[in-house]
Structure formats: structure tokens, C-alpha cells
């Protein structure tokens, strides 16, 4: 699935100098964190995609936020009404927040983590809301966000299961297909939230 490119920052909470929201636009930029100011109830950034598209996966790198929520909308509407794509998710527990530890977790969200009726529509505005209620001294936001998606029909497109296993007798996958190099295959497990 292709990466969905961002066009520009639509709006943003007050940012910390050096951690502006424009850092999120270039997914290949080495230092691309965005941080809002400490002590606020929430910090929010709204990013506009180049065009309306389906969002199939969202990868988020945390930057000391306790909770992160992803909402979507359409720029063509007179007044943008945001719908929850991914509900508020915990990235740090209260003890980690108070001790300022483990603030850079990465979580990958697939279709099973999204509101299916919202994921079934095309969107071009992405609103990321970050909260840090446990440590009012921390500047917080996100290190990066990467969206993948596209117009392809998800029912008919092949999707590789993270737990594909080889049949020891035939050398085929469980679904009957053959790997290119069975000797190089390893069973992998992925952690998705």
C-alpha cells in the first residue's frame, strides 16, 4: 500500500521552538518531531493530505504523550466535522509519565483497530490529539505519523498474514502458494495495537 503524502499543516496548537508541526510533513526527514507546550490539557495538529483517500494503516511514533487519538474529516465541507478513526489509545502509563521514561513508543494501527464505518470512506484531513494529564512539565506531541492506504479494493487484494507457516511436507504456505526461497523463510510475529 502506498504512503499517503501530506500537503500542509492545516492548524496546530502552540508548538515548542524547533519542534514545529511542519516537521511531520516529510516522512524521510531525520528530525521530524512535533511537540506542543507543556501543561495544556491537549495538543492538536491537523494535517491535510494531498487528496482524499482511504486510510488503511496508521503508524505513530510517540513524543511523551500519554494518550493519542486520530480523527478524520473532509476539507470540502464548510465546517470540518471530525470523526474518530482510531480512539484514544494509551502510549504511556502514569508512572512512565511521572518518571519521564519510555516516551518514544511506536504503535501500528491496522484496519482492525479503526472505526470500520469511518475507514470505509475517503478523507483528506487528519487530526491528531495528544494528551498528557500525568506530568504537566513535559512538552509532548508525536515523533512521526505515517499513513498508508489507497483506492484498491481491500477484499480482493492479497494480504500476507504475519503468522504464515510452512507445511513441513509440501513446502507450501497454508493457503497453497509456494514461497520464492523457502529456506530463507522464518516465522515472524508482529506486535500491533
Image (spheres, rainbow, N blue to C red):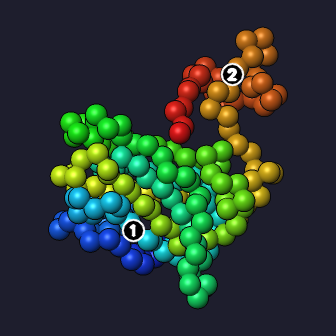
Residue 77 horizontal/vertical position (percent) = 61, 84
Q: Of residues 93 and 123, which is closer to you in this image? A: 93
Residue 105 horizontal/vertical position (percent) = 37, 41
Horizontal side of 191 relative to 38 (left or right) equals right
Residue with the mark numbered 1? 45
Any mark on residue 73, and which? none
Horizontal side of 76 relative to 143 (left or right) equals right
Horizontal side of 156 relative to 45 (left or right) equals right
Name the residue at the bottom extreme.
78
Q: Assign the N terminus to one quadrant of the image.
A: bottom right
Q: What element carries label 1?
A: strand
What residue lies at 52% left-to-right and 33% top-to-bottom?
A: 191
Viewer-side label of 2, 1: 1
Q: Which of marks 2 and 1 is nearer the N terminus?
A: 1
Rounded to the nearest angstrom, the CA distance separating label 2 from label 1 is 41 Å
Residue with the mark numbered 2? 165
Q: Is mark 2 on a helix, strand or loop?
A: loop
What residue lies at 39% left-to-right and 68% top-to-bottom?
A: 45
Residue 57 horizontal/vertical position (percent) = 58, 52
Amino acid at each position: 500500500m502506498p504512503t499517503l503524502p501530506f500537503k500542509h499543516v492545516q492548524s496546530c496548537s502552540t508548538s515548542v521552538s524547533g519542534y514545529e508541526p511542519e516537521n511531520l510533513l516529510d516522512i524521510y526527514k531525520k528530525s521530524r518531531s512535533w511537540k506542543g507546550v507543556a501543561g495544556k490539557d491537549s495538543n492538536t495538529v491537523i494535517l491535510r493530505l494531498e487528496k482524499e483517500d482511504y486510510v488503511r494503516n496508521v503508524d505513530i511514533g510517540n513524543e511523551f504523550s500519554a494518550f493519542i487519538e486520530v480523527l478524520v474529516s473532509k476539507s470540502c465541507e464548510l465546517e470540518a466535522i471530525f470523526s474518530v478513526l482510531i480512539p484514544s489509545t494509551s502510549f504511556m502509563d502514569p508512572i512512565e509519565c511521572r518518571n519521564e521514561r519510555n516516551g518514544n513508543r511506536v504503535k501500528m494501527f491496522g484496519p482492525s483497530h479503526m472505526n470500520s464505518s469511518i475507514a470505509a470512506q475517503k478523507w483528506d484531513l487528519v487530526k491528531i490529539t495528544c494528551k498528557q494529564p500525568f506530568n504537566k512539565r513535559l512538552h509532548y506531541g508525536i515523533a512521526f505519523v505515517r499513513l498508508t492506504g489507497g483506492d484498491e479494493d481491500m477484499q480482493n487484494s492479497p494480504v500476507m498474514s504475519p503468522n504464515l507457516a510452512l507445511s513441513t511436507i509440501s513446502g507450501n504456505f497454508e493457503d497453497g502458494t509456494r514461497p520464492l526461497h523457502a529456506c530463507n523463510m522464518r516465522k515472524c510475529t508482529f506486535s500491533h495495537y
